[in-house]
Image (cartoon, rainbow, N blue to C red):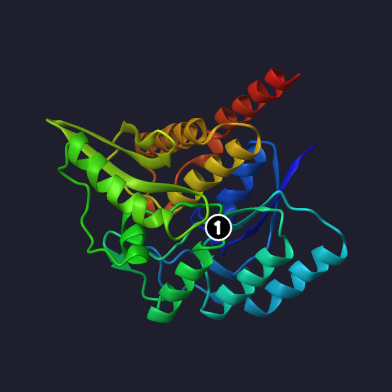
Amino acid sequence: MTKNVLAMHDLSGFGRCALTVIIPTLSALGVQVTPVPTAVMSTHTGGYDGFTFADMTDTMLPAAEHYSRLGLHFDAVYSGFLGGEAQLSIIDRIIGMNGTSFVLVDPVMGDDGQIYKTYTAAMCDGMRRLCKRADMITPNVTEACLLTDTEYRPFSGMDRRDAESYADTLLTKLGELCRGNVVMTGVEISDGTVRSMGCAVKSQNGTELIMSPEECASYPGTGDIFASVLLGAMLTGDTLTDAARLAVDFTHTVIRRTMDAGTPSRYGVLLEQSLTVLTEHYAEKANEEE
């Protein structure tokens, strides 16, 4: 039976991020997406001026209530960028309405050591409370530090031993904030002249770093793609570690192809050219189950 995810994220018309990448990514992994937009914008906020912004707060709960009346079941509830503080309590209520669903909270709060301008202290506190409802959270390093009230320190320049130690410290603190798995993105290792990027996963075997060769470029939407691959792969039978490896490798692939094409960063990654990687993975999983 096809898995179904209730996805509460913003919809940015141009720039390949949030719902415009979440829907095709999960679909390629054989997962149906039912979107509940938190905001609708003409573009994302990175590199564009004059974008339009429509707050969708008033429509979120009525949409979820309609789905409840229809008797729809969601295998997962997945939240990301929020348009304002009021949405935190709404998402909490929607999670409660779908009590048997797997809950993924991607705490979109900041990057590169800086909190987003739209975030207030009250929203940070509310995000910590929301994480307690989650079966899995996927913060980047900045968000991990914000959530755990830890002074921000980037991974840049760390060797594997130091990176594992730092990651383990953050993951242990994050594990106290949620009821399940923690996957932290933006982890970096320096081994002489070779650098690699990836994520840190807390599992029964301890802290594991899952890495790929670093690509020296930053694009909007890659965190959304990563979390969506992670969720989709787990819903269709992959272990946490295997899903994280697929997410790291796929994110690396789309960044590499986008760099090779010379696509401007604010346009986002060339996701469309890489989705066959995910459809092939899903087909392989389906064949294994037959």
Q: Is residue 270 left or right of residue 171?
A: right
User: At 69% from the left edge and 36% from the top edge, which residue is drawn?
Assistant: 30
**Residue where numbered disc 1 is placed:** 134
Can the viewer see residue 217 in this picture? no
Residue type at tag 1: Ala
Query: In the displayed structure, would residue 11 be above or below residue 89?
Result: above
Quarter of the image where the C terminus is located: top right
> Residue 55 at what x, y percent from top left?
59, 77
Quadrant of res 286 = top right
Residue lying at the far right in this picture: please name it: 70
Which residue is farthest left? 192
Q: Residues within 10 Å of mark 1 (few under 14, many from 20)?
A: many
Report the front residue among 183 and 223: 183
- Residue 159: image quadrant is top left
In the image, what residue occupies the spot 55% across and 28% down? 277
Judge from the rendering whether residue 59 lies leftward or rightward of residue 163; answer left or right.
right
- Residue 165 versus residue 282: which sits nearer the camera? 165
Q: Position of residue 40 (x, y in %)?
A: 59, 69
- The x, y position of residue 203, in whole percent, is 44, 38
Q: Find numbered disc 1 in the image and state the secondary structure of the residue it sits on.
A: loop
